[in-house]
Image: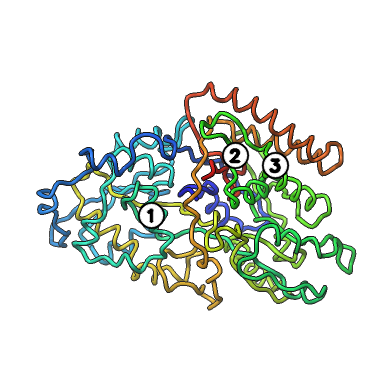
Amino acid sequence: MSIWSGSPPRLYRTLAAAAILLLAWPVAGCRDAAEPSASPGGGQTAAASASAGAPGTRTPAEEEDWEPYEADDEEQTLTVMYASEEAFYRDIGNLFIARYPKVSFEVVDLSATRGDGDLVADYERVLDKRQPDVLLMEPPIYRALADKGRLQELELPIRRSGFDLDGFVPGVIELLKEGGGGHLYGLSNHFTSRALYYNKTLFDRYGIPYPASGISWEEALRLAGRFPKRDGDGQPLYGLYQPTFTVSPFDLVQRIGAAGKLAALDPKRTSLQYGSQSWSRVFKQVMEGYRSGAVAYPKAPLSDNGDGSFSMSLGGNAFAEGKAAMAVDDVLTLRMMDIQARGGEEAAFDWGIVPAPVDPASPGRTTLFELSDIYAINRDTDQAALAWTFLSFLHSDEYMKLISRSTTGLLAREGYERDARGRDLSAFYALGPDTGISDTLVPVGFSQAFQHIAADAIEAAVSGKLTDDEALAQIVAEGQRALDEKRKSAGLESFDLNVFGSARAATGG
């Protein structure tokens, strides 16, 4: 899969944390959409730039000049990018200063990189103005800056410092190198993956066999359909619950199609491909799940306040509440179950986790393995040695041990497959990323327009106002008109149907 397939990570993580802390209390937020500036396979790759002598390329003489940082009595300032100054010192800065007391920091708030146009261009504007030594970015920006030779290649400092790269989860390095055109320009200390949760109590009650590792999406949908649609008290019972922050009912269609390497657009990215027989089959499977009640229809946790902000209110998680037999989600569902436990509402059922559903043709790979924040070093920094010392500390086993008891994410080093309560998280680590799928780029504004088009058509199909064929034809026709209209804009964005959802369109392989 593409390195940046997935939800806008920073907002997802922020609101996920808010959900853990607040559950049903409304909070304010804003959309943070990722928009890569260059198409996969297009333009000059990072590898090609290096061979052509791009600005980020080191000559052998420069390699001889590279020296590791040595702490001394001289005070030095490192300029870093982070969500905020307060968050930086809480999460990283104070720990680093305890080790290197002569180092101080200047923090460039990432909010300065958010604009109304192309995300990469907005980011580069701040990069040019502030010239931070250490960059923090989302994957679309990582690929773009690596393409442009604006990041320092890390192979030399890794080799010279003896940094343990082998201890990383292989998929993390695989995605980072894919985004760098075969070279490593950045590191991530967390990743996101999803697994299939299942309620053992419900499976036992209805005599249905548990899902097993390697289950396909089609098998998961069939399994969901075997459960009654009402429990013994007459309350709704779902076979499959979608991730907590799912907004678009088309998200599941897209997720299953992406797993099967179905193309959302033609190679030139000018024509929607949802009218194909393969997409039609997926669409009808999901529609049947919605109509029957086997698949929970997503309800957006956000409401537009009309002033550019949103309010979030979570009524709960159907799986955590014992009202769904299965759920495909990240560790957020686990954390929400913990919140219930602390509130005296510990799950009254046995449950388990297996790796997420896969495409039978690629059983060891998933489109749901994602990176969010990537740290890199500015090519033009004059603090390269200190910047690398900071990066190596931030991605060291030492640092991950320090945060392993408090983090709510998946750590990118091996050896942390159990959470703070000792529960086995290996299902989230079991599958590697599907790097055979590329990200689809669309004009700015198309993703949101398509989300509404798809939602209207799906609601009509579920209510019986349209047949499945009519609904899909409507999605294709209205979606194509929206695509043609939005192509008049200058910027590009990743095709993201869902403010929080995991599925993005794939160009296909």
Under circle 3, the secondary element is: helix
**401 to the left or right of 281:** left
Residue 358 drawn at (x, y percent): 60, 59
Camera-near label (3 vs 1) is: 3
Rendered position, 508 above or below 329: above
Question: How far, Cα to Cα, is label 3 from label 1?
Answer: 49 Å
Residue 316 drawn at (x, y percent): 71, 59
Which mark sits nearer the N-terminus, 1 or 2? 1
| Residue shown at the point (29%, 67%) measured from the top left | 164
| Residue shown at the point (26%, 65%) measured from the top left | 163
- Specify the amino acid type for callout 2: Ala
Under circle 2, the secondary element is: loop
Residue position marked by numbered label 1 in the rendering: 88
- Specify the amino acid type for callout 3: Gln
**20 to the left or right of 434:** right
Q: 432 and 11: which one is in front?
A: 432
Q: 338 and 120: which one is in front?
A: 120
Residue position marked by numbered label 3 in the rendering: 277
Residue 261 drawn at (x, y percent): 57, 48
Residue count near mark 3 (Cα–Cα under 10 Å), binned few <14, some 14–19, many ≥20: few
Residue 320 drawn at (x, y percent): 70, 66
Camera-near label (1 vs 2) is: 2
**410 to the left or right of 209:** left
Q: 8 and 31: which one is in front?
A: 8
Question: How far, Cα to Cα, is label 1 from label 2?
Answer: 39 Å
Residue position marked by numbered label 2 in the rendering: 264
